[in-house]
């Protein structure tokens, strides 16, 4: 392959058939694709990402029929939700088929399945003719990639082939819902809310409960946080009423900070500001790119103003809040 020529779907399929890795765009973030039925390829995904083996992978299918080949059972709830939301940012967790490599599901009895709503992802899966694992295409713990360049900067071209589909329009990872026949429970919040799922199912869906938020007291440092979606610089989140304290620290401390804010606050020099969208959907689409832009300046620290979820009650704020809780520590 000519290294100057962008890879085609045919190049990508060849790479996947040889057990290689292909990053592909989805409507949420870029995925690190590999043949879901090839145990060595799956192993390579874990190694390349530095992903803890206990963290299972999401399997991407072109349609519900392909998804069902990975499931031992396909509950009625899965049919209803796939009809209502696929292709789209919804991952269904169902009992796994025995032919899947055990590493895909972290040895567990269930598999996470989704059908991504992106023409490049769908073309790739169809041309390959089988399901692909597709965790976010970033080293484990880092901010997820929402542009092809984010992936190219993270992995050498001989390790990961990158299909460029431009920026991802969703910007945060899919909603994950557990369907085990009895339970319907959101395991990870995303762009599709528990209320939307309940509406489609005509049944209660247990919303996501942020266990981290229930921890007593603020963590001493961002370094102590269960690092996920996290920038390299120490990152704090603050509420609008904490602004005077943030300002004090900006004035007192050496080094340059970057503040992500939705309000037109003026910052003392030499600190930098990134203005964030005020509506939840655009905020989510912008979040990871903004964290990367902040990090790229090599700041002493990053501060993120907690979005005014009270102003506009959009359930997408719950998903944004979840990612921010993992990316930052509370300002104190
Ligand atoms: P990522 O691929 O980086 O978006 O992360 C995939 C996430 O999907 C995991 O961290 C889990 O939260 C969730 N997940 C994947 N497989 C399962 C499963 N079998 N059961 C529960 N959650 C899962
Ligand atoms: Mg990830």
Image (spheres, rainbow, N blue to C red):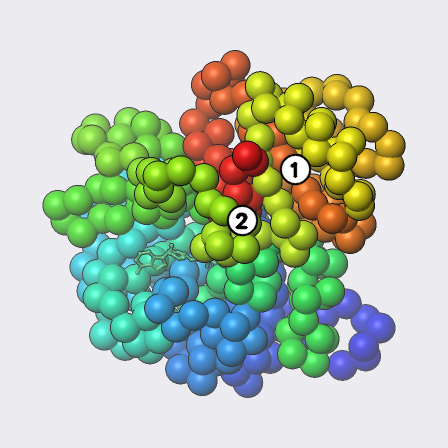
Nearer-the-camera pick, 167 or 172: 172
Name the residue: 75% across, 21% down: 265
Viewer can see residue 97: yes
Q: Is residue 99 left or right of residue 28?
A: left
Nearer-the-camera pick, 257 or 206: 257
From this view, report whether residue 2 is shown above or below residue 190.
below
Rounded to the nearest whole Å, what is the CA distance between mark 1 and mark 2?
A: 13 Å
Q: Quadrant of the N terminus?
A: bottom right
Find disc 2 in the rendering and name its residue. Answer: 221
Element at badge 1? Answer: strand
Q: Quadrant of ligand 1?
A: bottom left
Mark 1 Cα-neighbour bin, 10 Å: few <14, some 14–19, many ≥20: many
Mark 1 or mark 2, earlier in chain: 2
Nearer-the-camera pick, 302 or 322: 302
From this view, report whether residue 166 is shown above or below residue 156.
above
Viewer can see residue 123: no
Name the residue: 35% across, 41% down: 215
**Image coords of residue 19 (percent x, y):** 52, 82
Note whether ligand 2 is within 8 Å of mark 2.
Answer: no
Q: Residue furthest right?
A: 269
**Image coords of residue 115 (percent x, y):** 43, 52
Q: Is residue 271 left or right of residue 182?
A: right
Q: Is residue 243 left or right of residue 174?
A: right
**Image coords of residue 78 (percent x, y):** 26, 47
Element at badge 2? Answer: loop
Name the residue: 18% across, 51% down: 180
From this view, report whether residue 194 is shown above or below residue 325.
above
Find disc 1 in the rendering and name its residue. Answer: 303
Name the residue: 17% across, 44% down: 183
């Amino acid at each position: 392959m000519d290294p100057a020529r962008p890879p085609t779907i045919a190049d990508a399929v060849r790479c996947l058939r040889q057990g290689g890795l292909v990053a592909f765009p989805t409507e949420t973030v870029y995925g690190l694709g590999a043949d879901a039925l090839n145990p060595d390829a799956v192993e390579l995904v874990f190694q390349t990402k530095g992903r803890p083996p206990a963290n299972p992978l999401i399997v991407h299918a072109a349609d519900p029929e392909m998804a069902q080949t990975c499931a031992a059972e396909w509950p009625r709830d899965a049919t209803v939700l796939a009809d209502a939301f696929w292709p789209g940012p919804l991952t269904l967790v169902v009992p796994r088929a025995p032919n899947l490599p055990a590493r895909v599901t972290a040895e567990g009895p269930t598999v996470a399945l989704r059908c991504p709503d992106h023409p490049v992802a769908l073309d790739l899966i169809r041309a390959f003719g089988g399901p692909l694992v597709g965790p976010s295409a970033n080293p484990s713990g880092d901010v997820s990639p929402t542009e092809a360049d984010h992936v190219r900067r993270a992995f050498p071209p001989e390790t990961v082939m990158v299909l460029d589909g431009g920026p991802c329009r969703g910007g945060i990872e899919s909603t994950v819902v557990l369907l085990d026949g009895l339970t319907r429970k959101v395991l990870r919040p995303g762009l599709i809310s528990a209320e939307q799922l309940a509406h489609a199912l005509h049944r209660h869906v247990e919303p996501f409960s942020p266990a981290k938020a229930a921890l007593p007291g603020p963590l001493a440092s961002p370094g102590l946080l269960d690092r996920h979606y996290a920038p390299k610089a120490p990152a704090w989140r603050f509420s609008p009423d904490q602004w005077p304290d943030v300002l004090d620290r900006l004035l007192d401390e050496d080094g340059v900070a970057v503040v992500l804010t939705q309000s037109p606050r003026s910052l003392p020099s030499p600190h930098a500001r990134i203005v964030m969208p005020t509506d939840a959907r655009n905020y989510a689409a912008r979040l990871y790119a903004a964290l990367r832009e902040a990090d790229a300046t090599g700041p002493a620290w990053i501060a993120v103003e907690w979005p005014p979820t009270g102003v506009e009650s959009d359930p997408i704020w719950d998903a944004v809040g979840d990612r921010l809780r993992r990316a930052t520590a509370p300002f104190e």
